Amino acid sequence: MARFITERLFKAALILLCIAILNFFLIRAAPGDPATIMAGESGAADEVFLQQLRERFGLDKPLYMQLFAYLSSVVKFDFGYSYRQQVPVLDLIIDRLPATLMLSVAAFVISLVLGIAAGAFASARQGRWSDTLISTVALLFYATPLFWLALMAVLLFSVQLGWLPGFGYETVGAGYTGVRRMLDILQHLILPASTLGLFFMAIYARMTRASMLEVNTMDFVKTAKAKGLRPAVVQRRHVLRNAILPVVTLAGLQAGQLVGGAVLIETVFAWPGIGRLMFDALSQRDYNLLLGVFVMSAAMVLLFNLITDVLYRIVDPRIRVTS
């Protein structure tokens, strides 16, 4: 296991390096630059002032020198300074990262638990009205645009019913501390996490149902039933345990997508995570901040994939990874 993790970490480092280089050139290919935007907002867009800004932030150097300086800093976990906010990029990301991780993990747990439970329930009642209902609801959530679902959730549960807060990370000006503040944050987390999780829940429910129906036809399941084991035991110990393997694989691959999906959710619900930070940096052409967020997001995706590989070996001990 230690050798396996070491090899995967080495590969992840190479992939992260390639992603950093690709993102660097993609961002530089976009029209506009930070100097033009900052000069325009300050009302002094003359060429002398633009040149001073470019020299100050190193934007006057050749592209390969900017790339080398950037990669040298990234290796040292130094993402530079934000052009607009004049603070280290790493400090801004660390300040916003807990909110995004909280949202992504909560949505992941909601989608995986509800998806597997709904899929297992539907497969055990194949052909009945409950099976049809679960499949229809799952298809509905999968086909519904995420932004529309988020807006409808705000209108229903926040505006109309008043059950949950619709926006923000916590109640502004409340001054809560300790457990009361934690409960307030969790209350604000329910709507964005549930909205983001429902989309992926639909995928896991349909895959769990299909996988369990396939495993149900295998010989070892028929043998377990012939031994007189209770149907619930057969479904839990024999069918679900084998059917869950493709779900674990898909969940690991899509865990990183939760970070990308969080950009839209954070915008709709005014959730102060790195998704909102990325959107603001893009609109302001804050290159260093945008590159830092991209690298951190890519690192999170690679970490989720590594965790998935480890969990896959634990769930199915038959798997042996060869170098």
Image (cartoon, grey):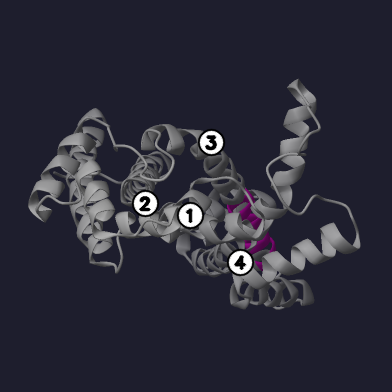
Q: Are marks 4 and 2 in contact (CB under 8 Å)?
A: no
Secondary structure under the numbered disc 1 in the rendered image? helix
Compared with 153, 323 (above or below) is above
| Nearest-to-viewer mark from 2 and 3 | 2
Picture quadrant where residue 39 is located: bottom left
- Which quarter of the rendered picture does the C terminus lie within? top left
Picture quadrant where residue 134 is located: bottom right
Q: Mark 3 points at which residue?
A: 98
Tell which circle, 4 or 2, labels the residue nearer the N-terminal end.
4
Tell which circle, 2 or 1, labels the residue nearer the N-terminal end.
1
Q: Callout 2, which amino acid?
A: Asp
| Nearest-to-viewer mark from 1 and 3 | 1
Compared with 244, 106 (above or below) is above
Q: Mark 1 points at which residue?
A: 280
Q: Which residue is drawn at 37% across and 33% down?
A: 88
The residues bearing labels 2 and 3 have C-alpha atoms spaced at a distance of: 22 Å
Left or right position of 73 against 82: left
Q: Position of residue 77 (x, y in %)?
A: 27, 32
Q: Which residue is drawn at 63% across and 76% down?
A: 144
Q: Are marks 2 and 1 in contact (CB under 8 Å)?
A: yes
Tell which circle, 2 or 3, labels the residue nearer the N-terminal end.
3
Q: Mark 2 points at which residue?
A: 286
Q: Callout 3, which amino acid?
A: Pro
| Between 269 and 218, the one nearer to me in the picture | 269
The residues bearing labels 2 and 1 have C-alpha atoms spaced at a distance of: 8 Å
Tell which circle, 1 or 4, labels the residue nearer the N-terminal end.
4
